[in-house]
C-alpha cells in the first residue's frame, strides 16, 4: 500500500532513503493489524502476556530502565528566531537541529520495519480535528497510537482530501540517553524524535503534535491547544455543564475527568461524564462560547494510585484490552501497582523478584494505554464534531502550602494571570528531581511550542466583544497540614468544589472578595458530609497575606524574564493583586476568611 497523495509518498520515500529500513508497512488501523502486531511483539519478548482470565487482551511492556519518562532538557523548539521559542523552551537553530537529527537517523532502521502511521487528532469528521503522519520503527508505538488516536485508513483518507499533515519521524534508536532528542519545527509543521520509546517522547500525536505544534497553529488560527482534561458535570436538574482543567503532569487530570460523585451527591442526582483526560482543543463558536474537543481517542494514564477508592472508573476499564508499561505483576500474571490492595506484587517493573528495599514495585510513572470507549463514564458527546461548550476553566497545581482550595478569578484577565502564575511540585512524569516547586504556567511549561509571552497575549486576546467566555478558577487539592497529610480528601470529593464553581457560573452561590480573588466560605461549599475539622477548612479557605505578597513578588521576577514581550496587561493584573495585599497588610490583624 501507499497513498494517492504524492507529497506523502515522496516524504515517506525520503525518510526511507535516510533510515534504510528492511521493509515499509502502511498502517490501516484494522483490528487484524493490531492483533498481528501484538502477536509479533509477544513472540519477540517486547510484550509480555498478562493473566488472560482476569485481564483478557492485556499486555505488559517493560521499557529500557533509562527510558521511563519525558525528557524536558532534550526536548527542543527549533524556530528560526530564538525568541520565538522563548525562555520557556530549550531552543536549537533549525539547521543545526536538522544536521544532528539527520546524522542520528542515517541508516538507523536497518533490519527494522518502517511503519507509516496516518492519524487524526480529534473526531474524524470534526472541523477542529487535525491530522498527522508518524513514521516509526517501533511496533509498540504503532499499537499505542492505535489506541490513542484515530489511526489508519480513515485518517489517511482525510489527509489525502485536505492535502496537508504534520510530519513526525521517530526511531527508538539505541535508547541511549546520550543519543536522544525530541525536536519540534513549528515553522515546518514537523517533529523528529530519536532514542526514546516512552509515551510523550514517542507517541508523536500526543504532546509533540497536539500540544507543541498545535499550540503554535492555534495562535495563528485563533484557537487554544491546552494541557487540559474535559469533564461534563450533570446536576440533579439533569443539565450538563463542561469544565476544562489544566493541571501539570501527574497532578490529577485523569482522576478528575473520571470522578465518581461521593455517595450523598450521587444520591442527590449528580453524574460525571468524561470527554478527555489530558488535552483540550478549544475554539470560539458562532455563539462566542469556547467549544472543545478531546484530540485523543484513548488514555495514557498514570497507574500508581489508581484504585477502587480513588478512580473506580479507570480501574473498570483496565481489566481488558489494555497495554501496561512498567507496572509490576502478581504471581499469577496480573498487573500490579502501588495503591492496589487486593493482591500483592511478585515481580517488579523490571521483571525482577519484588524486593521493597529496591523501591516501589511499579515504576512511579508506570502507565496504562486504553481506548476511551472502555471508560464507563465516557461521554455520549465526547465524539461530537462541534465539541462541547465550556462553562468554566480551572487551573491547578500541586502545592503543599499557601494556595487555597479554590480561587475564582474576578475576570478573564485576572484568570489568565492566575494561570500564568501557576506553579507546582514536580512529579515522576518527567525525568529529574521529584517534589521541587517550579513555575508551570497553565501546566504548559513542557508543552507550549512558542514564547510564553506571546502565549499569554494570545490568551488575553480572547477577551473581546462578542465572546461569552467561561469563568476561570484556580484549585489546589494538595494542601498539607502540619502532620504532612493532605488537608482535602480529594478525588470524588473534588466534585464539591466543581459544584460550587458551576453555581457561581449560574449566579447561585456566594463568595467573598479577597485581594487574590473570590473565595467560598466553608458554608458556601457542600462539605457537611465530610466532617472535616474546622481548622482544616479554615486552612484550606484562608489567605496568608505575607506569603501571598512574597508569591506575587516572585511572580514579578518570573514575568521579568520575558522582557518587553510580556503583555503589560498581565503585569498590571499582578500589580493590582500586590497593591491590594499591601493595603491589607498595613492593617493590624490577619483576616481569616471563615
Ligand atoms: P498526566 O497523565 O501525567 O498528565 O497526569 P494527570 O494529571 O492525569 O494525573 P493523574 O490523574 O494520573 O494523577 C496523578 C497522581 O495524583 C495519582 O497518584 C493520583 O492518585 C494523585 N491524585 C489525583 N487526584 C488527586 C486528588 O484529588 N488528591 C490527591 N491527594 N491526589 C490525587
Ligand atoms: C504527561 O506527562 O503530562 C503525560 C504523559 O500526559 S506523556 O504522554 O508521556 O507526556
Ligand atoms: Mn499530561
Image (cartoon, rainbow, N blue to C red):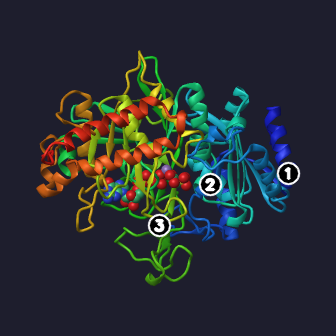
Image location (x, y in percent) of residue 220: 60, 27
How far is disc 1 from disc 2 in space, using C-alphas? 21 Å
Label 3 packing within 10 angstroms: few (<14), some (14-19), many (20+): many
- Residue 368 is left or right of residue 17, and the answer is left
Q: Secondary structure at mark 1?
A: helix
Label 1 packing within 10 angstroms: few (<14), some (14-19), many (20+): some
Number of numbered callouts drawn: 3
Tag shown at residue 18? 1
Which residue is painted at 22% across and 31% down in the image?
A: 237
Q: Nearer the viewer, residue 81 or 336?
A: 81
Ligand 2 within 8 angstroms of badge 2 C-beta: yes
Which residue is painted at 30% across and 53% down in the image?
A: 477
Q: Secondary structure at mark 2?
A: helix
Which residue is painted at 31% across and 32% down in the image?
A: 240
Image location (x, y in percent) of residue 428: 48, 63
**Residue annotated with mark 2:** 201
Sequence-wise, the earlier of marks 3 and 1 is: 1
How far is disc 3 from disc 1 in space, using C-alphas? 37 Å
Amino acid at each position: 500500500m501507499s497513498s494517492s497523495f504524492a507529497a506523502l509518498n515522496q516524504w515517506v520515500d525520503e525518510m526511507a532513503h535516510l533510515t534504510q529500513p528492511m521493509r515499509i508497512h502502511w498502517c490501516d488501523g484494522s483490528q487484524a493489524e493490531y492483533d498481528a502486531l501484538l502477536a509479533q511483539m509477544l513472540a519477540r519478548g517486547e510484550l509480555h502476556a498478562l493473566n488472560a482470565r482476569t485481564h483478557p487482551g492485556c499486555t505488559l511492556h517493560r521499557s529500557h530502565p533509562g527510558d521511563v519518562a519525558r525528557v524536558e532538557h532534550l526536548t527542543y523548539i527549533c524556530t528560526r528566531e530564538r525568541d520565538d521559542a522563548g525562555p520557556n523552551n530549550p531552543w536549537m537553530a533549525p539547521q543545526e537541529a536538522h544536521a544532528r537529527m539527520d546524522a542520528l537517523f542515517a541508516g538507523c532502521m536497518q533490519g527494522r520495519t518502517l511503519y507509516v502511521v496516518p492519524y487524526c487528532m480529534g473526531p474524524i469528521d470534526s472541523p477542529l480535528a487535525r491530522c498527522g503522519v508518524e513514521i516509526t520503527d517501533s511496533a509498540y508505538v504503532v499499537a499505542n497510537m492505535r489506541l490513542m488516536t484515530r489511526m489508519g485508513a480513515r485518517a489517511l483518507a482525510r489527509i489525502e482530501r485536505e492535502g496537508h499533515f504534520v510530519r513526525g519521524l521517530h526511531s527508538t534508536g539505541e535508547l541511549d540517553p546520550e543519543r536522544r532528542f525530541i525536536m519540534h519545527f513549528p515553522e515546518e509543521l514537523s517533529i523528529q524524535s530519536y532514542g526514546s520509546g516512552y509515551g510523550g517522547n514517542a507517541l508523536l500525536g500526543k504532546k509533540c503534535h497536539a500540544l507543541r505544534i498545535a499550540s503554535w497553529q492555534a495562535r495563528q488560527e485563533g484557537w487554544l491547544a491546552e494541557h487540559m482534561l474535559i469533564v461534563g458535570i450533570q446536576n440533579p436538574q439533569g443539565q450538563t455543564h463542561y469544565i476544562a482543567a489544566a493541571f501539570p503532569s501527574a497532578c490529577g487530570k485523569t482522576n478528575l475527568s473520571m470522578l465518581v460523585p461521593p455517595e450523598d451527591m450521587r444520591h442527590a442526582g449528580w453524574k460525571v461524564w468524561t470527554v478527555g483526560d489530558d488535552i483540550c482543543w478549544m475554539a470560539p463558536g458562532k455563539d462566542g462560547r469556547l467549544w472543545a474537543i478531546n484530540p485523543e481517542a484513548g488514555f495514557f494514564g498514570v497507574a500508581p494510585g489508581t484504585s477502587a477508592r480513588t478512580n473506580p472508573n479507570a480501574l473498570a476499564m483496565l481489566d481488558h484490552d489494555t497495554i501496561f508499561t512498567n507496572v509490576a505483576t502478581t504471581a499469577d500474571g496480573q498487573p500490579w501497582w502501588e495503591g492496589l490492595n487486593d493482591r500483592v506484587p511478585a515481580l517488579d517493573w523490571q521483571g525482577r523478584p519484588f524486593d521493597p528495599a529496591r523501591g516501589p514495585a511499579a515504576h512511579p510513572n508506570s502507565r496504562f494505554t486504553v481506548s476511551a470507549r472502555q471508560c464507563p463514564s465516557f461521554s455520549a458527546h465526547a465524539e461530537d464534531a462541534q465539541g462541547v461548550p465550556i462553562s468554566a476553566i480551572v487551573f491547578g497545581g500541586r502545592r503543599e502550602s499557601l494556595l487555597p482550595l479554590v480561587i475564582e478569578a474576578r475576570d478573564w484577565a485576572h484568570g489568565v494571570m492566575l494561570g500564568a502564575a501557576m506553579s507546582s511540585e514536580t512529579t515522576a512524569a518527567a525525568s529529574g528531581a521529584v517534589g521541587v516547586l517550579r513555575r508551570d504556567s497553565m501546566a504548559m511549561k513542557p508543552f507550549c511550542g512558542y514564547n510564553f509571552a506571546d502565549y499569554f497575549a494570545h490568551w488575553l486576546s480572547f477577551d473581546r466583544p462578542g465572546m461569552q467566555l467561561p469563568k476561570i478558577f484556580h484549585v489546589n487539592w494538595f494542601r498539607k497540614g502540619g502532620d504532612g497529610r493532605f488537608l482535602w480528601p480529594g478525588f470524588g470529593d473534588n466534585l464539591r468544589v466543581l459544584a460550587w464553581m458551576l453555581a457561581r457560573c449560574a449566579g447561585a452561590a456566594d463568595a467573598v472578595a479577597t485581594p487574590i480573588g473570590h473565595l467560598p466560605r466553608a458554608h458556601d461549599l457542600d462539605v457537611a458530609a465530610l466532617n472535616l475539622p474546622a481548622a482544616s477548612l479554615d486552612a484550606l479557605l484562608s489567605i496568608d497575606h505575607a506569603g501571598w505578597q512574597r508569591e506575587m513578588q516572585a511572580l514579578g521576577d518570573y514575568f521579568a524574564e520575558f522582557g518587553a514581550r510580556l503583555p503589560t496587561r498581565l503585569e498590571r493584573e499582578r500589580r493590582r493583586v500586590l497593591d491590594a495585599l499591601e493595603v491589607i497588610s498595613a492593617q493590624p490583624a490577619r483576616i481569616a476568611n471563615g
